[in-house]
Image (cartoon, rainbow, N blue to C red):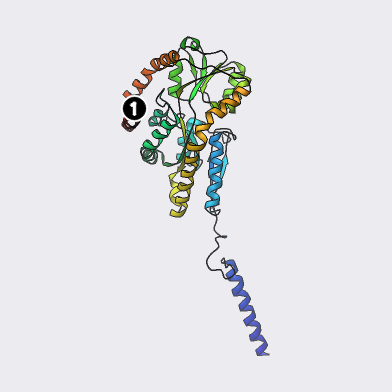
Amino acid sequence: MKKKISVLLVLLLIVSMTMSLAGCGGNGGNGGDSGSDVKPVEWIAYSTWPESNHQSTALVEFAKRVEEASGGRIKITVHTGGALGYKGTEILNVVRDNLVQISDMSMGNVAGEEPVFGITTLPFMLESMDEGYTLNQLARDDYDALLEAKWNQRILYSSPWPMAGFWTKKPVESIADLKGVKMRTYDRNTGLVVEAVGGTPYPLPFADVYSSLATGAIDSCLTSAPTAVDAKFWEVLDYYTPTAVAMTQDIVTINMDEFNKLDKELQDILLSVGDDIQKEMWEEIGPNMDAEMEKVCTDNGIQIVTPGDDFIQELYDKTSAIREDWLKTAPEEAKKIYEEFNEAVGR
């Protein structure tokens, strides 16, 4: 009888130990913890741009690659189209306050909060996509230092926009054709451009652009071709004059408190994926985007008005005071970047 009880106790002990091992992540003798009991880091990423816009699709791709590279240890839910209600001008504060952990933002849109970023949309500051990338790379360390010190965040990657021009109801072939326009602008510098040519700037959120054009609250827009496609300008406007008056870019940043919670392996994954996305956006997607988006517009009825040299020179002269005034009041970091950039491109 005692022997039977002893055998039963041994069996119960074996079962108990087996269950205990299973509960602690035992993995059938393969060694180590499978990680299945470790809760993944779950973040929100945000974009004000429509789901189909290149900035939004890049953010979705970033989230996908991070989850794959981290083996599911980081999961990022992306909200596009301004779905969370935060406006483009608010994003620096939104990420700083950890209302979302990651967000895309137009540097021009947030230049009111951080004046250094105004350099990206100075009229005729940039003359090509290559120059935009040069500025970005040259200023990256300064941007990161500034963002961490003042805004508790850092850049994961940057992404370009093509050059901006005038989208209008009537053809624009001279400065005189712009007098009296009611034009949507996206930051202070583009607003000053419209004022310089005799128009009235309307700094509307992107979500309000189409309805404002449709109702006549505005009659034109200063922006690039991808935005025109997003808003289906061909339904409410007729002409595009590609003056290359300004070029902005977006950055995607992460809240530093959240970044610092990660171990180095996960931090390196975030930065590595960000580097890959940035390279693709500047080298593969960006250079082809303008022509592709313009074709979509012309296929749908928009007429391209090629600006003459005299018009571009007049526009350059009319906006020279904007550049000069900006330099007078710009933060020292911005002046440093401005001088280094001009030296780098030979101006």
**Residue 122, image x, y percentages:** 40, 24
Give 13 or 116, whichever is nearer the viewer: 116
* Quarter of the picture holding the C terminus: top left
Residue 134 as seen in the image, left or right of residue 1 = left
Give 250 or 286, whichever is nearer the viewer: 286
Task: Please tell me whether residue 215 is drawn above or below residue 284 in the rendered image.
Answer: above
Q: Image quarter for residue 96?
A: top left
Task: Inspect the image, locate mark 1, and give the three-letter code of the amino acid beneath it.
Answer: Ala
Q: Image quarter for residue 84?
A: top right
Density class for disc 1 (Cα within 10 Å; few <14, some 14-19, many ≥20) is: some
Total numbered labels: 1
Give 35 or 152, whichever is nearer the viewer: 35
For mark 1, give the secondary structure: loop
**Residue 8, image x, y percentages:** 66, 83
Task: Please tell me whether residue 229 is drawn above or below residue 271 in the rendered image.
Answer: above
Task: Please tell me whether residue 244 is drawn above or below residue 270 in the rendered image.
Answer: above
Using the rendered image of the protein, determine whether residue 128 is visible from the camera's viewpoint.
yes
* Quarter of the picture holding the N terminus: bottom right
**Residue 22, image x, y percentages:** 60, 68
- Residue under label 1, please give it: 330
**Residue 138, image x, y percentages:** 36, 36
Residue 221 as seen in the image, left or right of residue 329 = right
Using the rendered image of the protein, determine whether residue 231 is visible from the camera's viewpoint.
no
